[in-house]
Image (cartoon, rainbow, N blue to C red):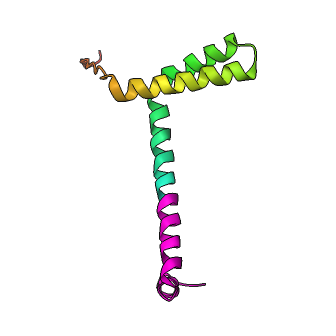
Amino acid sequence: MTTLQTHLATLRAKPEHIKRHIALWSSAGISLVIFLFWLGAMTGVTSQASSTVAQAVESTGSPASSLVASVGSFFGDIKDLLFTPKKVTYSTVEVRPGN
């Protein structure tokens, strides 16, 4: 089993163009993982979007039209998330001792 220090020493010994290639693909992979987490967080916020997509899929007859409906709904949800301010409503809860 190699340790992190031996792995880094092996990478330092490689030619410059190989190090640049490894750095490019590593940063692309990390960026992809961050983007997927971000996308997952955005879909969790839009619970209403899933019902909209479900209604669109039920009302369509072919797979192509359901794909078009879901893509259109996705872009509409992204637009709403980015450009529509969210209204936050606070309510008060009163706690009284029981009998």
The part of the chain drawn in magenta is 1-29
On-image quarter of the N terminus: bottom right
Residue 15 percent across, percent down from the top left: 51, 85
Q: Main secondary structure of the magenta part?
A: helix
Instruction: Between residue 42 and residue 10, name the one nearer to us.
Output: 10
Residue at screen point 52% across, 72% down: 22
Look at the image and say whether residue 96 sits in the magenta stretch.
no
On-image quarter of the C terminus: top left
Q: Is residue 34 above or below residue 68?
A: below
Rendering quarter of residue 78: top left
Residue at screen point 41% across, 26% down: 79
Residue 13 percent across, percent down from the top left: 50, 89
Q: Which residue occupies the extreme top position in the image?
A: 59
Instruction: Between residue 43 and residue 32, name the one nearer to us.
Output: 32
Residue 47 percent across, percent down from the top left: 49, 24
Q: Is residue 46 visible?
A: no
Q: Is residue 21 above or below residue 68?
A: below
Q: Is residue 53 above or below residue 42?
A: above
Residue 38 percent across, percent down from the top left: 45, 43
Q: Horizontally, is 45 left or right of 83 in the view? A: right
Instruction: Between residue 15 and residue 66, name the one nearer to us.
Output: 15
Residue at screen point 48% across, 73% down: 20
Q: Which residue occupies the extreme right position in the image?
A: 62
